Image: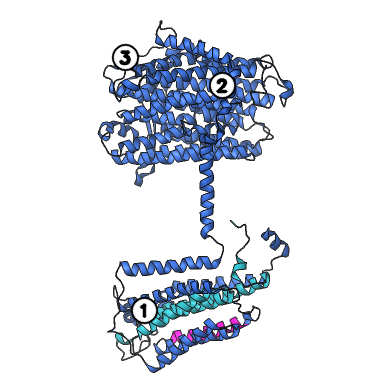
Chain colours: A cyan, B blue
């Protein structure tokens, strides 16, 4: 399963990067969203997908049976942070479109004589 | 008393200057400043009896003990002489500046703060025994010189001159630091005194020659030696008191000081002698030759300073010969060191007065262009007298101090022809010849300076202001210096015993144990010898050439400017400026995409490179989780939705597909036994989609019209690269563990230590509680940012301004 997941992660990263390199602001934001999904799955896979029981202490379950709690803690933090970033990004896009009238990244590069 | 702290007295006084300037505006700020050099001069003069007997004083203050860096003030004959010059000339210059700079129009607080800063820096250079602090003070003089040259910063020429001096002297300073580091590596100490003791052992070291050359680069740039002298003429944009102080009497002599101080370390080397004496003498000739080309009074003085510094430098080089001579007292080699220091004093005195006169002429007539000046003799009689005394001393005429040291200079140069080491016996004859030629031109430009300004026809119509004599206060300092010029001529041996001989002992400690052993007696008349005939020749040829100056001076204009050293500097500056700008514009395109491409390429490069180099790539097929039916279904959904996003032309489809990806990930969390993650992901994903829809209502359609195939292909290559890299990373990181996981610790202690059952939650709120707190802070910052952006309304006016 880990090998299949690794390929899927690569695919997610590929799609994310491809979207982020495009000129449209919306696609860039969607790209960052995909990137965080990829990163979450990567963390999960790194720790190993084994474990027969969720990491909640229960009677009669030996320690080695729990799924790895560490990646899960990291991912939980990452989900929340990526949500904050995505919403910030969205509002930034919305406002800049409202003020500047375009979402084309080539037109958003500042003045010609910037130095 | 720990006199090491006195070095910082001017800097301390500088703190109060702005306050005094603002609050006590009625009194010229210079009067308060004047107290500083006067007090210091009196204090340091009281140390004279110690050094006259060859004694020395040390005062120490630890700065960074762990790095063995300390302020060590070491006062012997040489440093005390320089200290007295700095404070003495400093006092006169401050006095002069009080009348030169108007208290209503000038930014006096800037001026005096810089000047006091410079004073501290200069005292630090000449008293430091520690190489690193010496370097520190050295660069501080470059900085204060930069600030003072650029004092009238609204003028283009001032800024240009300031930058030029800074570039050249700081370049030299850095080279010198390299030399110091090499010295400290060889000697395992930063102390100059200890290095001098170790000199014979270091001479065979591989680094020795490098240290020598690097240190000389520092000294030559600072003391405006060929070919680095080009900054000095441009530094004349500084107010005249600054030129008199920094650029003739003190700062430019820092290089001479360094050479003098380190002569005992390097004198053993023939390279040292050739470089110092050779470059010095050539500079002396070059400077005097081109002084006659100048039309600006201060320009003449600048080139004359270059030339005189070269003269002293060559004498210091010649004094190294003493290291190789056994019975110095019976030869003429003993004169070089004495002549160097003696001329250094003479030069500071007469050149200071000449600069002040140039300032007075500028101040009272409104121009420094020598072609417009003339016939000021009757209008400015006192200034004329002072200028004549200074210039005649410079030309080497009796009865002025310069005559004595010029004679000794010729003696020292003649003695080099008798020196039989380092091929001197073959090439040594060049030294007296070049020295003589340089002296002839020195004679001519001295006369040119005085007589083309004060004699000839008065041209009132060409002067911006009607000329008149300067106010008495402005004349005090130059008159005082002019009197000194004459006094030195009549009591040269008193000066020699008090100031020169103790300093010579510091330069040539390998010859003398006490100053009284320096067996030089100065006299104005020493019979009919070669020196006398050379001097007479200088007067005759110089006089003749000055008489015919108007006929041949124009030939200077035939030197093409395009191949001068100044043009080289300008081109270098332009090339580095322009080149650096072009280079950064090459990759700083302003397109976010370019930067992302750099970043992603770098990620691929670094990660794959590391995997390859450390041979970290591995796949472990043994310890895998089983592949189940649900997993495959979810996976297909995930890949399918991602594909939908990639090809979708409608924003709504893309958003919903993104949501589908998110929910698939949530389902993965369920399957892989992460219930907390699944819950969080579901909530967050729902809110995200809602937010996207809300915002997208206001956003345009996805437009890909402008993206050409080549553009897309490039993106695809990078995207595939990143994808493959991440797959490989995921595989290797799962397949091998460099060290045991710390998860076991959490699993084992979660109940006993933290009293909780849900391990993930306990990690977040207990073990890593602070991380979670900061995470909340991030959320808070993001929400504040969002609110601000929504509230923000750019006014149209501001927007237009931004675009212009």
Q: Is residue B700 above or below residue B292?
A: below
Q: Is residue B684 magenta?
A: yes
Q: CA distance from mark 3 to mark 2?
A: 35 Å
What percent of the width, then of the height, locates residue B382?
63, 15
Task: Say what secondary structure mark 2 lies in.
Answer: helix
Q: Label 3: which residue?
A: B331
Q: Foreground mark, 3 or 2?
A: 3
Answer with the quarter of the image where residue A65 lies. Answer: bottom left
Say if mark 2 contacts mark 1, CB within 8 Å: no
Q: What numbered label is drawn on residue A46?
A: 1
Q: Main secondary structure of the magenta part?
A: helix
Q: Is residue B92 visible?
A: no
Q: Residues within 10 Å of mark 2 (few under 14, many from 20)?
A: many
Quarter of the image holding residue B720? Answer: bottom left
Q: Residue furthest right?
A: B461
Q: Does residue B170 appear left or right of residue B415 in this picture?
A: right
Residue that appears at 36% across and 44% down: B65
Q: Name the residue rendered at 57%, 86% in the picture.
A: B653
Magenta part of the protein: which range? B675-693
Disc 2 target residue: B353
Residue found at x 29% / y 80%: B620
């Amino acid at each position: 399963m880990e090998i299949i997941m690794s390929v899927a992660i690569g695919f997610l990263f590929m799609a994310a990067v491809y979207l982020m390199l495009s000129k449209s602001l919306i696609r860039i934001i969607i790209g960052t969203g995909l990137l965080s999904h990829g990163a979450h799955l990567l963390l999960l896979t790194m720790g190993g997908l084994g474990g027969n029981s969720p990491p909640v202490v229960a009677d009669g379950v030996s320690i080695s049976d729990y799924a790895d709690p560490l990646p899960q803690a990291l991912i939980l933090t990452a989900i929340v942070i990526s949500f904050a970033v995505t919403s910030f990004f969205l509002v930034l896009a919305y406002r800049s479109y409202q003020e500047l009238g375009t979402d084309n990244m080539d037109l958003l590069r500042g003045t010609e004589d910037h130095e | 008393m720990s006199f090491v702290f006195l070095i910082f007295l001017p800097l301390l006084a500088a703190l109060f200057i702005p306050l005094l300037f603002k609050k006590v505006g009625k009194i010229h700020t210079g009067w308060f400043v004047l107290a500083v050099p006067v007090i210091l001069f009196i204090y340091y003069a009281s140390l004279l009896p110690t050094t006259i007997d060859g004694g020395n004083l040390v005062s120490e203050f630890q700065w960074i003990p762990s790095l063995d860096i300390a302020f060590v003030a070491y006062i012997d004959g040489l440093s005390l002489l320089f200290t007295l010059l700095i404070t003495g000339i400093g006092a006169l210059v401050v006095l002069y500046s009080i009348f030169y700079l108007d208290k209503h129009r000038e930014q006096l607080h800037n001026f005096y703060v810089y000047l006091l800063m410079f004073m501290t820096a200069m005292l630090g250079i000449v008293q430091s025994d520690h190489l690193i602090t010496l370097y520190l003070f050295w660069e501080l003089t470059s900085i204060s010189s930069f600030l003072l040259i650029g004092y009238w910063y609204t003028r283009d020429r001032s800024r240009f001159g300031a930058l030029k001096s800074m570039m050249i002297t700081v370049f030299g300073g850095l080279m010198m630091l390299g030399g110091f580091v090499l010295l400290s590596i060889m000697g395992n100490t930063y102390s100059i005194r200890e290095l001098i003791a170790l000199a014979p052992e270091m001479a065979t070291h591989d680094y020795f020659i490098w240290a020598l050359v690097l240190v000389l680069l520092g000294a030559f740039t600072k003391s405006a030696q060929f070919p680095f002298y080009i900054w000095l003429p441009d530094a004349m944009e500084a107010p005249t008191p600054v030129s008199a102080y920094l650029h003739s009497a003190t700062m430019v002599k820092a290089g001479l000081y360094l050479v003098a101080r380190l002569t005992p370390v390097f004198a053993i080397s023939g390279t040292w002698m050739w470089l110092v004496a050779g470059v010095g003498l050539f500079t002396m000739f070059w400077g005097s030759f081109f002084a006659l080309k100048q039309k600006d009074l201060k320009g003449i003085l600048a080139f004359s300073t270059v030339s005189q510094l070269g003269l002293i430098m060559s004498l210091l080089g010649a004094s190294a010969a003493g290291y190789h001579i056994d019975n110095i007292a019976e030869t003429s080699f003993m004169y070089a060191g004495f002549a160097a220091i003696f001329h250094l004093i003479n030069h500071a005195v007469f050149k200071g007065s000449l600069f002040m006169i140039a300032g007075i002429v500028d101040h009272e007539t409104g121009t420094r262009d020598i072609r417009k000046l003339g016939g000021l003799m009757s209008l400015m009689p006192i200034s004329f007298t002072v200028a004549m005394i200074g210039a005649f001393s410079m030309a080497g005429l009796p009865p002025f101090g310069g005559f004595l040291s010029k004679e000794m200079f010729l003696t020292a140069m003649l003695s080099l022809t008798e020196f039989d080491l380092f091929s001197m016996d073959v090439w040594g004859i060049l030294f007296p010849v070049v020295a003589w030629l340089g002296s002839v031109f020195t004679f001519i430009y001295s006369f040119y300076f005085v007589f083309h300004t004060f004699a000839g026809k008065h041209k009132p119509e060409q002067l911006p202001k009607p000329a008149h004599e300067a106010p008495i206060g402005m004349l005090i300092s130059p008159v005082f210096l002019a009197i000194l010029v004459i006094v030195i001529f009549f009591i040269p041996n008193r000066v020699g015993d008090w100031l020169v001989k103790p300093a010579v002992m510091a330069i040539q400690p390998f010859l003398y144990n006490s100053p009284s052993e320096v067996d030089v007696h100065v006299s104005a008349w020493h019979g009919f010898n070669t020196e006398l005939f050379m001097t007479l020749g200088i007067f005759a040829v110089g006089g003749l050439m000055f008489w015919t100056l108007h006929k041949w001076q124009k030939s200077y204009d035939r030197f093409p400017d395009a191949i001068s050293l100044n043009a080289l500097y300008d081109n270098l500056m332009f090339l580095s400026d322009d080149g650096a700008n072009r280079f950064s514009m090459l990759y700083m395109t302003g397109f976010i995409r370019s930067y992302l491409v750099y970043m992603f390429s770098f990620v691929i490069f670094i990660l794959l490179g590391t995997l390859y180099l450390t041979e970290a790539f591995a796949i472990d097929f043994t310890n895998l989780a089983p592949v189940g039916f649900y997993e495959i279904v979810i996976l297909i959904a995930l890949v399918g939705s991602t594909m939908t996003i990639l090809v979708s032309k409608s924003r709504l489809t893309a958003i919903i597909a993104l949501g589908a990806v998110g929910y698939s990930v949530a389902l993965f969390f369920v399957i892989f036994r992460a219930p907390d993650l699944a819950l969080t992901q579901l909530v967050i994903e729902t809110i995200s989609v809602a937010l996207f829809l809300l915002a997208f209502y206001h956003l345009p359609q996805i437009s890909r019209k402008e993206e050409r195939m080549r553009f897309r292909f490039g993106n695809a290559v990078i995207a595939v690269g990143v994808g493959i890299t991440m797959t490989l990373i995921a595989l290797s990181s799962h397949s091998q563990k460099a060290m045991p996981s710390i998860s076991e610790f959490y699993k084992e202690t979660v109940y006993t230590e933290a009293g909780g059952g849900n391990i993930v939650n306990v990690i977040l709120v207990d073990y890593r509680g602070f991380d979670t707190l900061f995470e909340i802070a991030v959320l808070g910052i993001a929400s504040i940012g969002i609110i601000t952006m929504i509230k923000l309304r750019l006014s149209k006016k501001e927007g237009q301004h931004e675009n212009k």
